[in-house]
Image (cartoon, rainbow, N blue to C red):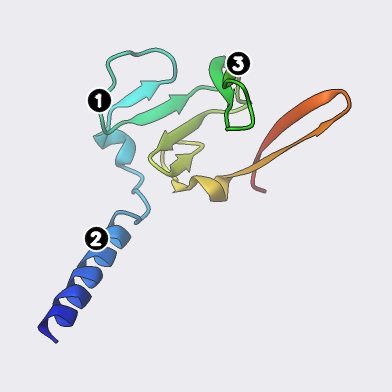
Amino acid sequence: MKFIRLISISLLLTSLVGCASMSTPTSSLIETKPVIKIGESDDVPKDHIVFIPANKKFPVEFAIKGNVFNKPSSSKIMVSFKQDMYLYKYWASLDGKTWVNSHKLMSVEPSGGFDASGGKVEVNLNLVQ
């Protein structure tokens, strides 16, 4: 009985700690964390905000892996966003002040398949309206 009680208390504490870390960042977050511009720093602090300025090209690496392939392969492409984007852990912001879960700001829709011409992988990343 004591063992079950100990497990229950441990699970409760773990869930409370997990929920606490999920609280939305405040508008002052940008004043308390280092802001690192994407692609411009090799010496990055562990806890930081990534800033992606509008129209700034940055690399995105696509990789394909799995036991059906002879060997994994990857390719790097350069892309840019239409507007500023701030990213912190699993939070995103367009202005650095109003933070939302990144999946509530952006919709990510991967798709792919094979036909006679070969394989196709597509990722649609859209702002949620």
Circle 3 or circle 1, nearest the eye: 3
Depth order, front residue of 114/85: 114
Name the residue that disc number 1 marks.
45
In primary-sequence order, the first of circles 3 and 2 is 2
Question: Which label was assigned to residue 111?
Answer: none
10 Å crowding of disc 1: few (<14), some (14-19), many (20+): few
Real-space Cα distance between discs 2 and 1? 23 Å
Circle 3 or circle 2, nearest the eye: 3
- Identified by mark 1, the residue type is Pro
Real-space Cα distance between discs 3 and 1? 27 Å
- Identified by mark 2, the residue type is Val
Task: Check whether the beta carbons of the residues at disc 2 and disc 1 lie within 8 A of each other.
Answer: no
Depth order, front residue of 25/9: 9
Locate residue 70 relative to residue 91 in the image: left or right.
right
- Residue at 18% of width from left, 81% of height from top? 4
Name the residue that disc number 3 marks.
75
Q: Secondary structure at mark 3?
A: strand
Residue 91's spot in the image, x, y percent? 43, 44
Name the residue that disc number 2 marks.
17
Residue 24's spot in the image, x, y percent? 37, 53
Depth order, front residue of 68/10: 68
- Identified by mark 3, the residue type is Ser
Position of the N terminus, as image quadrant, is: bottom left
- Residue at 28% of width from left, 27% of height from top? 34
On the image, which quarter does residue 87 sit in?
A: top left
Vertical order, 98 against 32 (above or below): below
Vertical order, 14 against 49 (above or below): below
Locate residue 104 relative to residue 2 in the image: left or right.
right
